[in-house]
Amino acid sequence: MNTVGSLHMHTGARGFEEWNHHLATHCGTFQCEPPAEQGLQAFSGGILPSSSGQAICPGSRIVSNCQHVHRQHRDIRQDDRDFYYLVMQMSGSGLMCQDDGQVMLSAHDLVLLDVNKPCDFYFNGLSDQLSLIIPRHFIESRFRHRQLLLNHRIAADSRLGMLTGLLTQQLFDAQPGCDEESEALLDALLALLRPNVTENLATPLPYQEQTQLHMLQKAKAFIEAQLINSDLTPSMIADRIGTSVRNLHRLFAHGDTTIGRYILERRLEQCAEQLKSEGAYEKVSSVAYQWGFSDVSHFSRSFKARYGVSPKAFRQH
C-alpha cells in the first residue's frame, strides 16, 4: 500500500476490491472499470472520508486511475439514497455525464449531480476528486421555485467558482462537533451555488396542470421501480398513484405516447444498457426476463424495431 498525501493508496486487484468497497460505503454503489491496457494489476486508488463527526454535509476525497466509473438504475435501486453530490476536481481531469449532457472538469472546477439519476465519469490517468453529500431537502428548500441545472460546470477561475471551491474544502475539513459552524458554511455554499446551478422557472402552471404533472411523475417513478415485474398493468399503476385507469391513459396521451409504449421503451432501454455492460456473460433471454419480458420472441422483434439490429447483434457490437 502506498501513500499519496494523507491518503493510503490501494493497488492491484485486491486493492481495487478494497477501494470499491470503500466507494460503495461512503458514496454509493458504482460500477468501476480499471485502466484498460494493464487491467486490475495496474490499479491505484484511495478514499479519505470527511471527519466522522461532521454529519451535516459529509464527503469523501476520491483518488483513482479508473478509466470509467458509472452508476445505473440497478445501482440506484440497490442503494435507495437521496441526496446530491457536489463534485470538485482537485487534480487531473474528468468528463461527467448526467441528464443527457456532459461537462469536462479541470482542476478545481465543480459540478452538481443527483444520486438518484444515472451518471458516468470518464478519466484519463490519475484523478483526484472531492465529493460532498448534500441532503436533498437542503437543496430543495433553498432553491424552491427555481429550475435545478444538473451537470453544469462551475468554472474554477470565475469569482463565484473560487469562493464555492473554498467553502467546499472548508466543509470537508470541518472538525467534529462544529455543527453550527458547518451549517453556516453550508448556507453560504448554497447561496453561492444558487446562481450557478439554478434558473428561474417559466410561468407557473395552473393548479390542475401541476397536479396532473405530479401524478405523471409518480406514475413514471412507480413504473421505474416495477419494470422487472412482468405482471405490471395500468390498473396496478393507477391504484398506486390514486387515479383512474382512464385518467392514467390520458396523462400519457398528453405526452404523445401510451402507457404500454412507455413501459416497453423503458424496458428496452434497460435491456440495451445491460447488453452493453454485461451482455457477454448473460443469455439474451435472461436479460429479457430480468426486465419484465415474458415472451422472448416479442422482445427480439421489439428490440430490433427500436435499435435496428437484433439483441445478439447489438451485444456483439
Image (cartoon, rainbow, N blue to C red):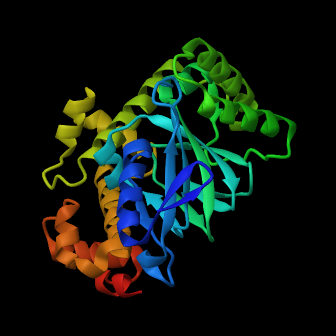
Percent position of residue 119, x then y: 50, 55
Toward the viewer: 281 or 35? 35
| Picture quadrant of residue 14 | bottom left
Percent position of residue 255, x then y: 46, 46
| Picture quadrant of residue 279 | bottom left
Asked if 134 appears above or below 45 in the picture, the reply is: above
Asked if 48 appears above or below 140 in the picture, the reply is: below
Toward the viewer: 22 or 89? 22
Query: Does any portion of residue 100 appear in the rendered image?
Result: no
Asked if 68 appears above or below 102 in the picture, the reply is: below
Percent position of residue 284, x then y: 22, 77
Q: Residue at x 79, y 39 (%)?
A: 161
Q: Residue at x 43, y 24 (%)?
A: 211
| Picture quadrant of residue 304 | bottom left
Toward the viewer: 229 or 192? 192
Asked if 69 appears above or below 227 in the picture, the reply is: below
Q: Residue at x 56, y 44 (%)?
A: 113
User: Does residue 123 appear left or right of residue 219 in this picture?
Assistant: right
Single out the residue that lies furthest toward the top: 180
